[in-house]
Amino acid sequence: MPVESDAELREILGLDTVAVVGCSSTPGKDAHEIPSYLREHGYEVVPVNPAAEEIFGREAYDSLADVEETIDIVDVFRPSEEVGGIVDAALDREDAPVIWTQLDIRDEEATERAEAAGRRVVEDRCMKVEHRRLR
């Protein structure tokens, strides 16, 4: 069951390092504006986008496997059909206790796999909206 309670969401929003899969270098796109907002509010944003060299002045990693930092949250800005592979990549890591999919992004099977592996999943919610609402 994906995380629904405000108490759990507040706890998750208290984490620090967010790997943003599908992070965009294009201002105006949600996949750029929301990670930018997170950075402005103290989060360490790690961009994951194989098509970009750098975003926000930071190296953009090709995949979650390439990220050297410890990840607290994997924030997914990719289509629902790509969630399964992203979840598998997150499960291959020993960190990344939370997988968060943005609005209109969901994959029930991937959510079940992640939860069975002990990860918490926030599904079909905007991290910026929830941060504004709960912090």
Image (cartoon, grey):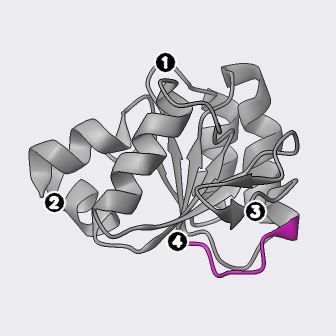
For numbered disc 3, what is the local secondary structure? helix
Mark 1 closeness class: few <14, some 14–19, many ≥20 residues within 10 Å: few
Q: Indicate which disc residue 26 carries.
A: none
Sequence-wise, which precedes: disc 1 or disc 4?
4
Q: Marks 3 and 1, how far apart in space?
A: 22 Å
Q: Badges 3 and 2: C-beta atoms under 8 Å apart?
A: no
Q: Indicate which disc residue 72 carries.
A: 4
Residue 79 is one of the magenta-drawn residues: no
Q: Answer above or below: position of 37 versus 123.
A: below
Q: Badges 3 and 1: C-beta atoms under 8 Å apart?
A: no
Q: Marks 3 and 2, how far apart in space?
A: 24 Å
Mark 3 closeness class: few <14, some 14–19, many ≥20 residues within 10 Å: some
- The residue mark sitting in front, 3 or 1, is 1
Q: Residue at x 47, y 24 (%)?
A: 28
Q: Indicate which disc residue 104 carries.
A: 1
Q: Which residue is mark 2?
A: 7
Tag 2: amino acid: Ala
Tag 1: amino acid: Asp
Q: Marks 2 and 4, how far apart in space?
A: 17 Å
For numbered disc 1, what is the local secondary structure? loop
Q: Indicate which disc residue 91 carries.
A: 3
Tag 3: amino acid: Leu
